[in-house]
Image (spheres, grey):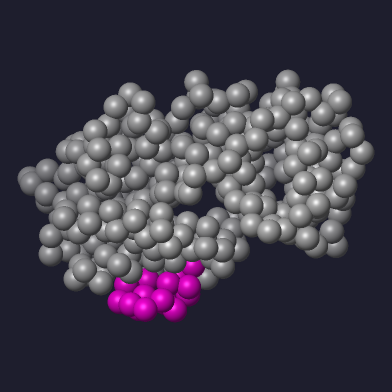
Amino acid sequence: MQHVVSSLRRIEGDFASRRVTAGQVSISIESSIVNTFSPAAPAATFVSMNKLDNKDVNISKGDNKEVNISKGDNSGIDTSERDNNKVDISKSDNSDVDFDPAAIGDRLADVYDGWYSSPVQGAAEIAATVDFLHARAGAGPALELGVGTGRIAVPLAARGVPVVGIDISPRMLDRMATKPGGRDVRAVVGDFAEVAASGGPFGLVYVVFNTFFGLRSQDAQVRCFVNVAAALRPGGLFVMEAGVPAPTRTDRDHHVQVDDVAGDTIRLSLSLREPISQQLRISHIVIEPHQTTNYPVELRYAWPSELDLMSRIAGLRLAERYSGWAGEPFTSSSPNHISVWRKPES
């Protein structure tokens, strides 16, 4: 546990700069945006950062696989290289970062269910989600965008709804196929923005758990709405679960959240928000006794009002909006939303 304590003691600082510069990253800790963009994640512990003797966290260039956080002096965290297992987050311009969603999905496949499908909270959240979707699927068929390991699609199919799932990560789909009932979901490898899945027209298309924000440009998000509308039958529904951006609850656009502490292992989420482009770059960092692994994620967030405009461009209309799967009212303080858009009958 000492390695975890040593790391946490050095992850202290409320840095004045929010820019990521060559070889360095400035981080501050706050709960709102990581928590907002993880609507089904377990409750987390949050750490507050103070100054680290005017030093930033120094992260050396690597190949986007891992970052080794070694002990440093009181001036900060020294992150040394690890034989082809390093992380490069030295770029402040997202256009310069080589980000492969399929490769990232493949890496996350082995840990995803363990992180987001806990026996208690995860099971309750999944049951509520499946109940909501089942009530709106009718006779189906249903299409899930970014189906992943089938966390929702498999139990929905078990309720008698024919389900097609599309995902860009073959390994995610392989994991789904190993689950009981996983092969009952017809899996399609592809970019879900294109909604290129046969079996329609669909009575229900859905995307959950902020997956829609994995489309990292406004053009891609609008294109997805248009393609969803084309894939729906008249009267069909498009359901989305997403976080509500909350910039007023953030601290200069960078955040660190402690997601889990178990023995000698700790899992952190570090995020950097770019408000102009609405980009959110997150690194899920797992610190273990002999290695530290980075799982990067990049998102483009959008407010419900922007999503409503996208739906209108696609010819859909908002039919329902809630703050949770149990139908809780959506208010100005809701951190998440469940939105339902309908395709007109004619």
Which residue is found at the position 92% from the left and 38% from the top?
Answer: 73
The percent position of residue 202, horizontal first and vertical second, equals 20, 59
Which residues are the magenta region?
Answer: 172-187
In this view of the protein, which residue sits in the foreground, 272 or 224?
A: 272
The percent position of residue 330, horizontal first and vertical second, equals 27, 32
Quadrant into which the N terminus falls: bottom right
Spot the residue most to the left.
Answer: 346
Instruction: Give the mark count.
Output: 0
Spot the residue most to the right.
Answer: 73
Q: Is residue 95 left or right of residue 322?
A: right
Which residue is found at the position 41% from the left and 54% from the top?
Answer: 121
The percent position of residue 307, horizontal first and vertical second, equals 33, 35
Q: Is residue 267 left or right of residue 53?
A: left
Quadrant into which the C terminus falls: top left
Q: In the figure, 71 relative to 186: above or below?
A: above
The percent position of residue 317, horizontal first and vertical second, equals 19, 37
Which residue is found at the position 37% from the left and 78% from the top?
Answer: 180
Q: In the figure, 71 relative to 168: above or below?
A: above
Residue 177 belongs to the span the image colors magenta? yes
